Amino acid sequence: MTESVVSVGIDLLAQAVADQAAPVFRVDWRPPLPDTEQDLATVALDPLRPDANARALERVLGVQALLVDVLPAHEAVGLERGEFLHAGPPITWERASGPLRGALMGGAVLEGLVDTPDEAAALFEGGLHVRLEPCHHRRSVGPMAGVVTPSMWMFVLEDPATGARAHCTLNEGLGKVLRYGAYAPEVLTRLRWMGDVLGPLLQRAVRAAAEPVDATAILGQMLQMGDEAHNRNRAGTLMLLRDLGPALVSSGADPADVAEALRFVGGNDHFFLNVAMPACKLALDAGRDVPGSTMVVAMSRNGTDFGIQVSGTGDEWFTGPAQVADGLYLGDYGPDDANPDIGDSAITETAGLGGFAMATAPAIVRFVGGSVPDALATTRRMGEITLGENPRWSVPVLEFAGVPTGIDVTKVCRTGILPQINTGMAGRVAGIGQVGAGLVTPPEEIFPKALTRLAALTRERADARTPS
Protein backbone atom coordinates (compact mmCIF):
# COMPACT_ATOMS: atom_id res chain seq x y z
CA MET A 1 0.00 0.00 0.00
CA THR A 2 1.34 3.43 -0.97
CA GLU A 3 1.27 5.87 1.92
CA SER A 4 0.53 9.54 1.40
CA VAL A 5 0.52 12.71 3.49
CA VAL A 6 -2.19 15.35 3.76
CA SER A 7 -0.73 18.79 4.50
CA VAL A 8 -2.95 21.54 5.93
CA GLY A 9 -1.67 25.09 6.06
CA ILE A 10 2.13 24.80 6.40
CA ASP A 11 3.65 24.50 2.95
CA LEU A 12 7.19 24.18 4.29
CA LEU A 13 6.39 20.79 5.83
CA ALA A 14 4.57 19.66 2.71
CA GLN A 15 7.55 20.51 0.55
CA ALA A 16 9.93 18.65 2.88
CA VAL A 17 7.81 15.51 2.58
CA ALA A 18 7.51 15.91 -1.18
CA ASP A 19 11.30 16.20 -1.44
CA GLN A 20 11.46 12.69 0.04
CA ALA A 21 9.33 11.40 -2.85
CA ALA A 22 6.18 10.84 -0.77
CA PRO A 23 2.82 11.82 -2.31
CA VAL A 24 1.48 15.00 -0.70
CA PHE A 25 -2.06 16.31 -0.93
CA ARG A 26 -2.10 20.01 -0.08
CA VAL A 27 -5.29 21.40 1.51
CA ASP A 28 -5.59 25.19 1.57
CA TRP A 29 -7.31 25.54 4.95
CA ARG A 30 -7.59 28.69 7.02
CA PRO A 31 -9.20 29.27 10.40
CA PRO A 32 -12.30 31.46 10.40
CA LEU A 33 -11.96 35.15 11.18
CA PRO A 34 -11.55 35.78 14.92
CA ASP A 35 -14.65 35.57 17.12
CA THR A 36 -16.97 34.51 14.29
CA GLU A 37 -17.47 30.84 15.19
CA GLN A 38 -20.72 31.26 17.11
CA ASP A 39 -22.30 33.57 14.54
CA LEU A 40 -21.18 31.27 11.72
CA ALA A 41 -22.85 28.34 13.43
CA THR A 42 -26.06 30.32 13.94
CA VAL A 43 -26.28 31.50 10.33
CA ALA A 44 -25.31 28.07 8.99
CA LEU A 45 -28.39 26.59 10.71
CA ASP A 46 -30.76 29.24 9.31
CA PRO A 47 -33.30 27.25 7.26
CA LEU A 48 -33.91 30.27 5.01
CA ARG A 49 -30.30 30.72 3.94
CA PRO A 50 -29.86 28.12 1.13
CA ASP A 51 -33.01 29.09 -0.76
CA ALA A 52 -32.53 32.79 -0.01
CA ASN A 53 -29.03 32.81 -1.46
CA ALA A 54 -30.13 30.83 -4.50
CA ARG A 55 -32.98 33.26 -5.09
CA ALA A 56 -30.83 36.37 -4.61
CA LEU A 57 -28.16 35.06 -6.99
CA GLU A 58 -30.77 34.05 -9.56
CA ARG A 59 -32.21 37.57 -9.53
CA VAL A 60 -28.78 39.11 -10.04
CA LEU A 61 -27.94 36.79 -12.94
CA GLY A 62 -31.33 37.40 -14.57
CA VAL A 63 -30.90 41.15 -15.08
CA GLN A 64 -30.25 42.60 -18.53
CA ALA A 65 -28.88 46.15 -18.41
CA LEU A 66 -29.78 48.31 -21.41
CA LEU A 67 -28.58 51.89 -21.96
CA VAL A 68 -31.89 53.68 -22.52
CA ASP A 69 -31.19 57.38 -21.94
CA VAL A 70 -28.75 60.10 -20.92
CA LEU A 71 -30.21 62.77 -18.62
CA PRO A 72 -29.12 65.59 -16.30
CA ALA A 73 -29.01 64.42 -12.68
CA HIS A 74 -31.86 66.70 -11.70
CA GLU A 75 -34.07 64.74 -14.11
CA ALA A 76 -32.53 61.30 -13.68
CA VAL A 77 -32.53 61.09 -9.87
CA GLY A 78 -34.34 64.24 -8.78
CA LEU A 79 -31.22 66.01 -7.52
CA GLU A 80 -31.99 69.60 -6.46
CA ARG A 81 -29.82 72.69 -6.13
CA GLY A 82 -27.53 72.35 -3.13
CA GLU A 83 -27.75 68.54 -3.10
CA PHE A 84 -24.62 66.51 -3.78
CA LEU A 85 -24.26 62.78 -4.20
CA HIS A 86 -20.99 61.08 -3.26
CA ALA A 87 -19.42 57.64 -3.36
CA GLY A 88 -19.40 55.27 -0.42
CA PRO A 89 -21.46 55.04 2.77
CA PRO A 90 -22.85 58.21 4.41
CA ILE A 91 -20.30 60.77 5.59
CA THR A 92 -20.16 64.37 6.76
CA TRP A 93 -17.90 67.16 5.53
CA GLU A 94 -15.98 67.04 8.82
CA ARG A 95 -14.89 63.43 8.15
CA ALA A 96 -14.55 63.71 4.37
CA SER A 97 -11.21 62.85 2.78
CA GLY A 98 -9.14 65.27 0.71
CA PRO A 99 -10.28 64.00 -2.72
CA LEU A 100 -13.95 63.98 -1.67
CA ARG A 101 -13.65 67.51 -0.34
CA GLY A 102 -11.91 68.62 -3.53
CA ALA A 103 -14.64 67.12 -5.72
CA LEU A 104 -17.38 68.73 -3.60
CA MET A 105 -15.63 72.10 -3.79
CA GLY A 106 -15.32 71.86 -7.56
CA GLY A 107 -18.95 70.73 -7.83
CA ALA A 108 -20.11 73.76 -5.85
CA VAL A 109 -18.31 76.08 -8.27
CA LEU A 110 -19.75 74.16 -11.23
CA GLU A 111 -23.28 74.72 -9.89
CA GLY A 112 -22.69 78.42 -9.27
CA LEU A 113 -23.18 78.11 -5.52
CA VAL A 114 -19.82 79.88 -5.01
CA ASP A 115 -17.31 81.60 -7.23
CA THR A 116 -14.14 79.84 -6.07
CA PRO A 117 -13.22 76.49 -4.51
CA ASP A 118 -11.92 78.29 -1.42
CA GLU A 119 -15.37 79.78 -0.84
CA ALA A 120 -16.86 76.31 -1.24
CA ALA A 121 -15.04 75.02 1.82
CA ALA A 122 -16.87 77.55 3.99
CA LEU A 123 -20.16 76.59 2.33
CA PHE A 124 -19.78 72.94 3.31
CA GLU A 125 -18.47 73.75 6.77
CA GLY A 126 -21.64 75.75 7.42
CA GLY A 127 -23.83 73.02 5.94
CA LEU A 128 -26.98 75.16 5.93
CA HIS A 129 -27.53 75.23 2.17
CA VAL A 130 -26.03 71.91 1.09
CA ARG A 131 -26.88 68.26 1.62
CA LEU A 132 -24.64 65.20 1.11
CA GLU A 133 -26.07 61.79 0.24
CA PRO A 134 -24.54 58.52 -1.01
CA CYS A 135 -25.02 57.74 -4.70
CA HIS A 136 -26.31 54.29 -3.70
CA HIS A 137 -29.28 55.92 -1.94
CA ARG A 138 -30.43 57.36 -5.30
CA ARG A 139 -30.09 54.18 -7.41
CA SER A 140 -26.71 55.45 -8.63
CA VAL A 141 -22.98 54.83 -8.45
CA GLY A 142 -20.06 57.20 -8.82
CA PRO A 143 -16.39 56.42 -9.51
CA MET A 144 -13.75 57.64 -7.01
CA ALA A 145 -15.19 60.64 -5.11
CA GLY A 146 -18.41 59.98 -7.02
CA VAL A 147 -19.65 63.54 -6.67
CA VAL A 148 -22.82 64.24 -8.65
CA THR A 149 -24.41 67.68 -8.96
CA PRO A 150 -27.81 68.53 -10.48
CA SER A 151 -26.42 69.73 -13.83
CA MET A 152 -24.17 66.72 -14.48
CA TRP A 153 -25.41 64.32 -17.13
CA MET A 154 -25.91 60.65 -16.26
CA PHE A 155 -26.19 57.36 -18.13
CA VAL A 156 -29.54 55.68 -17.48
CA LEU A 157 -29.61 51.87 -17.58
CA GLU A 158 -32.79 49.82 -17.36
CA ASP A 159 -33.78 46.18 -16.96
CA PRO A 160 -36.56 45.63 -19.53
CA ALA A 161 -38.12 42.82 -17.50
CA THR A 162 -38.75 44.94 -14.42
CA GLY A 163 -38.30 48.57 -15.48
CA ALA A 164 -35.76 49.06 -12.68
CA ARG A 165 -33.10 51.70 -13.38
CA ALA A 166 -29.56 52.62 -12.28
CA HIS A 167 -27.45 55.68 -13.07
CA CYS A 168 -23.89 57.02 -13.32
CA THR A 169 -22.26 60.26 -14.49
CA LEU A 170 -20.20 60.49 -17.68
CA ASN A 171 -16.50 59.62 -17.41
CA GLU A 172 -14.09 62.58 -17.50
CA GLY A 173 -10.91 60.67 -18.34
CA LEU A 174 -7.80 60.20 -16.18
CA GLY A 175 -5.39 62.47 -14.33
CA LYS A 176 -6.60 65.83 -13.05
CA VAL A 177 -10.35 65.25 -12.99
CA LEU A 178 -13.08 66.05 -10.49
CA ARG A 179 -13.65 62.47 -9.39
CA TYR A 180 -10.03 62.33 -8.17
CA GLY A 181 -10.55 65.56 -6.23
CA ALA A 182 -9.06 68.04 -8.74
CA TYR A 183 -10.87 71.34 -9.32
CA ALA A 184 -8.47 73.45 -11.43
CA PRO A 185 -10.03 75.72 -14.10
CA GLU A 186 -9.40 73.16 -16.86
CA VAL A 187 -11.31 70.55 -14.85
CA LEU A 188 -14.35 72.80 -14.62
CA THR A 189 -14.05 73.83 -18.27
CA ARG A 190 -14.16 70.16 -19.29
CA LEU A 191 -17.18 69.50 -17.07
CA ARG A 192 -19.04 72.47 -18.56
CA TRP A 193 -18.34 71.15 -22.07
CA MET A 194 -19.60 67.74 -21.01
CA GLY A 195 -22.80 69.36 -19.72
CA ASP A 196 -23.35 71.71 -22.65
CA VAL A 197 -22.23 69.50 -25.55
CA LEU A 198 -21.37 65.88 -24.76
CA GLY A 199 -24.39 65.04 -22.62
CA PRO A 200 -27.00 66.35 -25.09
CA LEU A 201 -25.16 64.68 -27.99
CA LEU A 202 -25.13 61.31 -26.24
CA GLN A 203 -28.80 61.71 -25.37
CA ARG A 204 -29.67 62.23 -29.03
CA ALA A 205 -27.54 59.25 -30.05
CA VAL A 206 -28.97 56.88 -27.42
CA ARG A 207 -32.53 57.87 -28.25
CA ALA A 208 -31.95 57.61 -32.01
CA ALA A 209 -30.09 54.28 -31.96
CA ALA A 210 -31.80 51.42 -33.79
CA GLU A 211 -31.94 49.47 -30.52
CA PRO A 212 -30.70 50.11 -26.96
CA VAL A 213 -27.05 49.40 -26.21
CA ASP A 214 -26.93 46.07 -24.34
CA ALA A 215 -24.39 46.78 -21.59
CA THR A 216 -24.67 43.26 -20.18
CA ALA A 217 -23.74 41.75 -23.55
CA ILE A 218 -20.87 44.20 -24.06
CA LEU A 219 -19.47 43.24 -20.66
CA GLY A 220 -19.47 39.61 -21.76
CA GLN A 221 -17.59 40.50 -24.94
CA MET A 222 -15.10 42.66 -23.06
CA LEU A 223 -13.96 39.72 -20.98
CA GLN A 224 -13.16 37.85 -24.17
CA MET A 225 -11.10 40.82 -25.40
CA GLY A 226 -8.78 41.46 -22.46
CA ASP A 227 -10.83 43.85 -20.28
CA GLU A 228 -11.87 43.19 -16.68
CA ALA A 229 -14.34 46.14 -16.66
CA HIS A 230 -12.86 48.10 -13.79
CA ASN A 231 -9.34 49.35 -14.48
CA ARG A 232 -9.32 48.15 -18.09
CA ASN A 233 -12.25 49.16 -20.33
CA ARG A 234 -10.61 49.71 -23.72
CA ALA A 235 -12.64 47.15 -25.66
CA GLY A 236 -15.87 48.20 -23.95
CA THR A 237 -15.32 51.86 -24.82
CA LEU A 238 -14.68 51.04 -28.48
CA MET A 239 -17.78 48.83 -28.64
CA LEU A 240 -19.89 51.62 -27.13
CA LEU A 241 -18.45 54.02 -29.70
CA ARG A 242 -19.28 51.46 -32.41
CA ASP A 243 -22.90 51.25 -31.28
CA LEU A 244 -23.48 54.99 -30.80
CA GLY A 245 -21.18 56.38 -33.52
CA PRO A 246 -23.63 56.15 -36.45
CA ALA A 247 -26.40 57.84 -34.46
CA LEU A 248 -23.97 60.57 -33.36
CA VAL A 249 -22.88 61.26 -36.92
CA SER A 250 -26.44 61.33 -38.24
CA SER A 251 -27.83 63.35 -35.33
CA GLY A 252 -27.85 66.62 -37.24
CA ALA A 253 -25.68 68.25 -34.58
CA ASP A 254 -22.80 70.60 -35.41
CA PRO A 255 -20.17 68.40 -37.14
CA ALA A 256 -17.42 70.05 -35.08
CA ASP A 257 -19.19 69.08 -31.87
CA VAL A 258 -19.69 65.52 -33.09
CA ALA A 259 -16.02 65.25 -34.07
CA GLU A 260 -14.90 66.54 -30.66
CA ALA A 261 -17.23 64.10 -28.88
CA LEU A 262 -15.87 61.19 -30.92
CA ARG A 263 -12.29 62.25 -30.17
CA PHE A 264 -13.04 62.58 -26.46
CA VAL A 265 -14.72 59.20 -26.09
CA GLY A 266 -12.26 57.43 -28.40
CA GLY A 267 -9.33 58.87 -26.48
CA ASN A 268 -10.71 57.93 -23.06
CA ASP A 269 -10.20 54.20 -22.49
CA HIS A 270 -12.21 54.35 -19.25
CA PHE A 271 -15.34 55.90 -20.76
CA PHE A 272 -17.25 52.60 -20.62
CA LEU A 273 -16.54 52.17 -16.91
CA ASN A 274 -19.39 54.57 -16.19
CA VAL A 275 -21.73 52.26 -18.11
CA ALA A 276 -20.34 49.08 -16.55
CA MET A 277 -20.85 50.39 -13.02
CA PRO A 278 -24.60 51.11 -13.24
CA ALA A 279 -25.05 47.82 -15.14
CA CYS A 280 -23.58 46.04 -12.11
CA LYS A 281 -25.59 48.22 -9.72
CA LEU A 282 -28.78 47.34 -11.58
CA ALA A 283 -28.05 43.62 -11.33
CA LEU A 284 -27.10 43.68 -7.66
CA ASP A 285 -30.08 45.81 -6.66
CA ALA A 286 -32.26 42.97 -7.96
CA GLY A 287 -30.69 40.72 -5.31
CA ARG A 288 -31.49 43.03 -2.40
CA ASP A 289 -33.90 42.45 0.48
CA VAL A 290 -34.08 38.65 0.44
CA PRO A 291 -34.57 37.58 4.09
CA GLY A 292 -31.89 35.09 5.10
CA SER A 293 -29.54 35.86 2.21
CA THR A 294 -25.88 36.38 3.12
CA MET A 295 -24.94 37.79 -0.31
CA VAL A 296 -23.15 41.15 -0.51
CA VAL A 297 -25.02 43.59 -2.78
CA ALA A 298 -22.69 46.61 -2.50
CA MET A 299 -19.05 47.35 -1.66
CA SER A 300 -18.24 51.04 -1.58
CA ARG A 301 -15.72 53.55 -0.21
CA ASN A 302 -15.80 57.29 0.47
CA GLY A 303 -12.07 57.75 1.09
CA THR A 304 -12.54 57.46 4.85
CA ASP A 305 -14.80 54.44 5.34
CA PHE A 306 -15.26 51.21 3.43
CA GLY A 307 -18.82 49.90 3.60
CA ILE A 308 -20.79 46.87 2.47
CA GLN A 309 -24.50 46.15 2.24
CA VAL A 310 -25.97 42.65 2.39
CA SER A 311 -29.15 41.30 0.81
CA GLY A 312 -30.60 39.99 4.06
CA THR A 313 -29.97 43.13 6.13
CA GLY A 314 -31.69 45.81 4.03
CA ASP A 315 -30.06 49.22 3.61
CA GLU A 316 -27.79 48.94 6.67
CA TRP A 317 -24.10 49.74 6.10
CA PHE A 318 -21.29 47.79 7.78
CA THR A 319 -18.18 49.94 7.78
CA GLY A 320 -14.50 50.00 8.65
CA PRO A 321 -11.51 52.18 7.74
CA ALA A 322 -10.69 52.38 4.02
CA GLN A 323 -7.23 51.01 3.15
CA VAL A 324 -4.47 52.52 0.98
CA ALA A 325 -4.01 50.48 -2.19
CA ASP A 326 -0.77 48.67 -2.95
CA GLY A 327 0.28 49.43 -6.51
CA LEU A 328 2.12 51.62 -8.97
CA TYR A 329 2.46 55.41 -8.73
CA LEU A 330 2.52 58.12 -11.37
CA GLY A 331 5.61 60.31 -11.73
CA ASP A 332 7.20 61.18 -8.40
CA TYR A 333 4.18 60.26 -6.29
CA GLY A 334 4.49 57.60 -3.59
CA PRO A 335 2.52 55.95 -0.78
CA ASP A 336 2.57 59.09 1.36
CA ASP A 337 0.70 60.95 -1.39
CA ALA A 338 -2.15 58.43 -1.74
CA ASN A 339 -5.53 58.73 -0.06
CA PRO A 340 -7.20 55.61 1.34
CA ASP A 341 -9.38 53.78 -1.16
CA ILE A 342 -12.37 55.67 -2.54
CA GLY A 343 -15.26 55.14 -4.95
CA ASP A 344 -18.38 53.15 -5.81
CA SER A 345 -16.52 51.37 -8.60
CA ALA A 346 -16.05 48.27 -6.42
CA ILE A 347 -19.63 47.53 -7.51
CA THR A 348 -17.88 45.80 -10.44
CA GLU A 349 -16.09 43.39 -8.12
CA THR A 350 -19.32 42.87 -6.18
CA ALA A 351 -20.85 41.65 -9.45
CA GLY A 352 -17.89 39.42 -10.37
CA LEU A 353 -15.84 41.77 -12.57
CA GLY A 354 -12.71 43.83 -11.87
CA GLY A 355 -10.45 42.00 -9.43
CA PHE A 356 -12.71 38.93 -9.59
CA ALA A 357 -12.14 38.71 -13.36
CA MET A 358 -8.39 39.40 -13.28
CA ALA A 359 -7.75 36.21 -15.25
CA THR A 360 -9.49 37.74 -18.29
CA ALA A 361 -7.13 40.72 -18.36
CA PRO A 362 -3.51 39.71 -17.67
CA ALA A 363 -2.35 43.00 -19.16
CA ILE A 364 -3.93 44.78 -16.19
CA VAL A 365 -1.04 43.72 -13.97
CA ARG A 366 1.16 46.24 -15.77
CA PHE A 367 -1.18 48.96 -14.49
CA VAL A 368 -1.98 47.78 -10.95
CA GLY A 369 1.02 45.60 -10.12
CA GLY A 370 1.41 41.85 -9.64
CA SER A 371 2.01 39.16 -12.26
CA VAL A 372 0.02 37.10 -14.75
CA PRO A 373 0.03 34.03 -12.44
CA ASP A 374 -1.27 36.34 -9.71
CA ALA A 375 -4.16 37.35 -11.96
CA LEU A 376 -5.15 33.73 -12.61
CA ALA A 377 -4.82 32.80 -8.94
CA THR A 378 -6.95 35.78 -7.88
CA THR A 379 -9.94 34.75 -9.99
CA ARG A 380 -9.70 31.17 -8.69
CA ARG A 381 -9.43 32.43 -5.10
CA MET A 382 -12.49 34.65 -5.45
CA GLY A 383 -14.42 31.52 -6.39
CA GLU A 384 -13.93 30.33 -2.81
CA ILE A 385 -15.99 33.19 -1.35
CA THR A 386 -18.83 33.40 -3.87
CA LEU A 387 -22.17 31.65 -4.30
CA GLY A 388 -21.80 30.75 -7.97
CA GLU A 389 -20.68 31.80 -11.45
CA ASN A 390 -22.13 34.11 -14.07
CA PRO A 391 -22.47 32.13 -17.33
CA ARG A 392 -22.91 35.36 -19.32
CA TRP A 393 -19.46 36.58 -18.30
CA SER A 394 -16.91 33.83 -18.88
CA VAL A 395 -13.14 33.52 -18.44
CA PRO A 396 -11.50 32.01 -21.56
CA VAL A 397 -8.25 30.97 -19.89
CA LEU A 398 -10.18 29.07 -17.20
CA GLU A 399 -12.03 26.88 -19.68
CA PHE A 400 -14.71 29.55 -20.09
CA ALA A 401 -15.91 29.23 -16.51
CA GLY A 402 -18.22 32.05 -15.46
CA VAL A 403 -16.77 34.81 -13.30
CA PRO A 404 -17.18 34.20 -9.54
CA THR A 405 -20.37 35.99 -8.51
CA GLY A 406 -22.26 36.61 -5.28
CA ILE A 407 -19.86 37.37 -2.42
CA ASP A 408 -21.03 35.36 0.60
CA VAL A 409 -20.43 36.93 4.02
CA THR A 410 -20.26 33.50 5.65
CA LYS A 411 -17.62 32.26 3.21
CA VAL A 412 -15.47 35.36 3.76
CA CYS A 413 -15.67 34.89 7.54
CA ARG A 414 -15.06 31.15 7.32
CA THR A 415 -12.03 31.31 4.99
CA GLY A 416 -10.53 34.69 5.85
CA ILE A 417 -10.26 35.41 2.09
CA LEU A 418 -11.08 39.06 1.37
CA PRO A 419 -12.50 40.35 -1.94
CA GLN A 420 -9.82 41.63 -4.34
CA ILE A 421 -10.40 45.08 -5.84
CA ASN A 422 -8.60 46.81 -8.71
CA THR A 423 -8.59 50.55 -8.07
CA GLY A 424 -7.18 53.93 -8.92
CA MET A 425 -5.50 56.04 -6.25
CA ALA A 426 -6.45 59.65 -5.58
CA GLY A 427 -4.10 62.17 -4.02
CA ARG A 428 -4.55 62.65 -0.30
CA VAL A 429 -4.66 66.45 -0.65
CA ALA A 430 -7.68 68.08 -2.28
CA GLY A 431 -6.96 69.30 -5.80
CA ILE A 432 -4.11 66.92 -6.72
CA GLY A 433 -6.00 64.34 -8.79
CA GLN A 434 -4.82 60.82 -9.60
CA VAL A 435 -1.51 59.58 -8.18
CA GLY A 436 -1.55 55.90 -9.16
CA ALA A 437 -3.44 52.62 -9.39
CA GLY A 438 -3.26 49.35 -7.52
CA LEU A 439 -4.88 46.52 -5.60
CA VAL A 440 -6.78 46.71 -2.33
CA THR A 441 -9.07 44.66 -0.12
CA PRO A 442 -11.81 45.72 2.30
CA PRO A 443 -11.01 46.01 6.01
CA GLU A 444 -11.45 42.57 7.54
CA GLU A 445 -13.74 43.64 10.37
CA ILE A 446 -16.72 44.66 8.24
CA PHE A 447 -17.63 41.08 7.36
CA PRO A 448 -17.88 39.87 10.99
CA LYS A 449 -20.04 42.95 11.67
CA ALA A 450 -22.41 41.93 8.89
CA LEU A 451 -22.33 38.32 10.10
CA THR A 452 -23.29 39.38 13.62
CA ARG A 453 -26.31 41.24 12.27
CA LEU A 454 -27.30 38.25 10.12
CA ALA A 455 -27.00 35.98 13.16
CA ALA A 456 -29.20 38.31 15.21
CA LEU A 457 -31.87 38.27 12.50
CA THR A 458 -31.63 34.48 12.33
CA ARG A 459 -32.21 34.21 16.07
CA GLU A 460 -35.15 36.63 15.88
CA ARG A 461 -36.81 34.49 13.21
CA ALA A 462 -36.17 31.34 15.23
CA ASP A 463 -37.70 32.95 18.33
CA ALA A 464 -40.75 34.00 16.31
CA ARG A 465 -41.25 30.39 15.18
CA THR A 466 -40.97 29.01 18.70
CA PRO A 467 -44.36 28.61 20.43
CA SER A 468 -44.64 30.71 23.57
Image: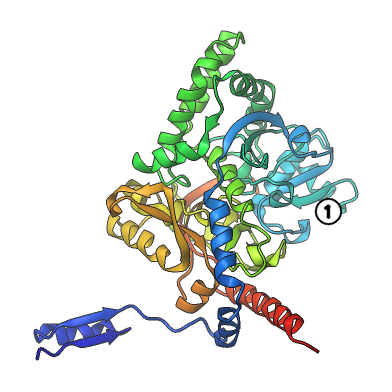
Residue 252 is drawn in which quadrant? top right
Q: Position of residue 255 (x, y in %)?
A: 56, 9
Residue 234 is drawn in which quadrant? top left
Give the left or right position of residue 27, taking residue 406 as reference: left
Query: Looking at the image, which residue is at 55% across and 16% down?
Result: 248
Kind of residue at disc 1: Glu
Q: Is residue 277 above or below residue 287?
A: above
Q: Position of residue 202 (x, y in %)?
A: 61, 23
The foreground one among 65 and 135 is 65
Query: Looking at the image, which residue is at 81% across and 33% down?
Result: 112
Query: Looking at the image, which residue is at 65% across and 25% down?
Result: 199
Counting every numbered tag in the picture gives 1
Q: Is residue 64 above or below residue 314?
A: above
Give the left or right position of residue 362, taking residue 78 as reference: left
Q: Residue furthest front?
A: 467
Identify the residue position indicated by label 1 in the image.
Answer: 125
The foreground one among 191 and 71 is 71
Q: Position of residue 175 (x, y in %)?
A: 52, 40
Residue 124: in sight, yes or no? Answer: yes
